[in-house]
Image (cartoon, rainbow, N blue to C red):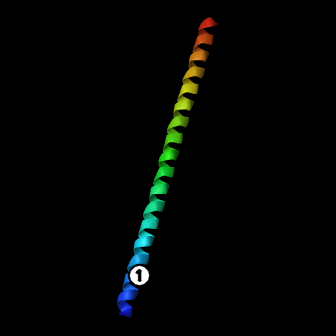
Amino acid sequence: MYIWNGLALFEEIESSRSAQIQSEFMWASKVIESLRHIEVFQEAVFTYDWQAANSETTRQSRLG
């Protein structure tokens, strides 16, 4: 009787830990995805700034 109660308690604890780990994994996945979006945004801004600076330099060199 005590062994079965102990096993049931152990299974409940393991199930709870598994759910907690899965929840933390999902949270970490969302953080990583957010960081990827930030990285893509920064790259887009850098590319835009570089193109804008490049076109301004080209325009100024044409004007003399």
Which element type, helix, strand or loop, lies under badge 1?
Answer: helix
Residue 53 at x, y percent in the picture: 60, 21
The local crowd at label 1, few if under 14, some if 14 to 19, many if 20 or more residues have their Cα within 10 Å, is few
Residue 16, image quadrant:
bottom left
Q: Residue at x 45, y 71 (%)?
A: 17
| Quadrant of the rendering where the N terminus is positioned | bottom left
Residue 64 lies left or right of residue 11; in this view the side is right
| Quadrant of the rendering where the C terminus is positioned | top right
Q: Nearer the viewer, residue 27 or 61?
A: 27
Residue 31 at x, y percent in the picture: 51, 51
Q: Residue at x 40, y 77 (%)?
A: 12
Q: Is 43 placed above or below 63 here? A: below
| Outermost bottom residue | 1
Q: Is 59 placed above or below 52 here? A: above
Label tally: 1
Q: Residue at x 62, y 6 (%)?
A: 63
Q: Nearer the viewer, residue 8 or 41?
A: 8
Give the residue number, with chain letter if any, for mark 1: 10
Residue 41 at x, y percent in the picture: 53, 36
Q: Nearer the viewer, residue 14 or 58?
A: 14
Residue 21 at x, y percent in the picture: 45, 66
Residue 50, image quadrant:
top right
Q: Nearer the viewer, residue 8 or 61?
A: 8
Mark 1: amino acid? Phe
